[in-house]
Amino acid sequence: MDLGLKGKSVLITGASKGIGLACARGFAAEGSTVHLAARSADLLAKACDELQSAYKVPVYTHQCDLRAPGAVKQLAQDCATVDILVNNAGDIPAGNLEAVNEQLWRHAWELKVFGYINLTREMYTRMKARGRGVIVNIVGMAGVTLPPEYICGAMGNAALEAFTKAVGKGAIEHGVRVLGMHPPATRTDRIIQLNKTIAKQKFGDESRWEELLKQTRMIEPEDVANTTLYLASERAKHLSGVMLNLGTY
């Protein structure tokens, strides 16, 4: 199936590993120009070399911390003409209400919640002026299942679902689509660290983290990437203001 992504340009945040890097590989394989944004210069350089070598497409890297003052505006300026934005960066910690204090909560939301909101605002304004563009928000099933042991992420993800639906509902009349998805547990380094925190809280022993995943259906980063490519493509041109659940309740 031709997704019509050849020659398109895409900006992916949190793109140096995990789901973000899987998305970058997918777009590069389709012939898209790829912009990678992340905090680690070393991982960005490694990802850039891999993509250029494997897919022979233009790849640009943007080392930035989207929490830093002015970082979102600078990234949007540097990538002003991209056709597609994939919001993916986030590092919300596990923990229940008592474990996550206000400082940690605000720090987490500054990247995952306000990072999505602010970069969407910047890129949407540019896309609206051109009359075309797609924004895909990769959020997370915690926004639907609302686990108390991941309360900061549950609330942030639920907020981002409402944000995506509201912006996408109005964007379509201007030729811009805004939509997203909730991946369930995905096989990345992050899922291990999250479950270590939960295991320490629940059992007093982080080494028991694998017990928490015994009954969990794990998906791969490539599964999320494939869905992202579809949503960003012309094959999904009828969709905006919707969220797909990739897991079960």
Image (cartoon, rainbow, N blue to C red):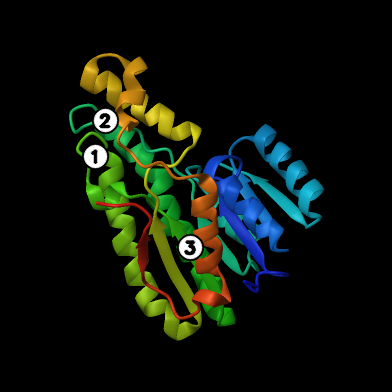
Residue beneath label 1, please?
Answer: 151
Residue appearing at x 71%, y 69% in the figure: 6
Tell me which amino acid carries mark 1.
Ile
Q: CA distance from mark 1 to mark 2?
A: 7 Å
Query: Whole-percent x and y of residue 144?
Result: 25, 53
Image quarter (top left, top right, bottom left or bottom right) of the N terminus: bottom right
Tell me which amino acid carries mark 2.
Gly
Q: Residue 216 bears which disc, if any?
A: none
Residue beneath label 2, please?
Answer: 95
107 relative position to 226: left or right: left
Query: Whole-percent x and y of residue 138?
Result: 44, 54
Query: Whole-percent x and y of residue 204?
Result: 24, 14
100 relative position to 121: left or right: left
221 relative position to 196: left or right: right
- Earlier in the chain: of badge 3 and badge 1, it is 3
Q: CA distance from mark 2 to mark 3?
A: 27 Å
Q: Residue 136 bears which disc, if any?
A: 3
Crowd tier of the residue under label 1, counting other residues whose Cα lies within 10 Å: few below 14, some 14–19, many 20 or above: many
Res. 74 visible in picture: no
- Earlier in the chain: of badge 1 and badge 2, it is 2
- Determine whether 240 is above or below 98 in the image: below
- Determine whether 175 is above or below 66 in the image: below
Residue appearing at x 37%, y 30% in the figure: 194
Q: CA distance from mark 3 to mark 1?
A: 23 Å
Crowd tier of the residue under label 2, counting other residues whose Cα lies within 10 Å: few below 14, some 14–19, many 20 or above: many
Tell me which amino acid carries mark 3.
Val
- Determine whether 40 is above or below 140 in the image: above
**What element does badge 1 sit on?**
helix
Marks 1/2 in contact by CB < 8 Å: the verdict is: yes
Marks 2/3 in contact by CB < 8 Å: the verdict is: no
Query: Whole-percent x and y of residue 67?
Result: 47, 43
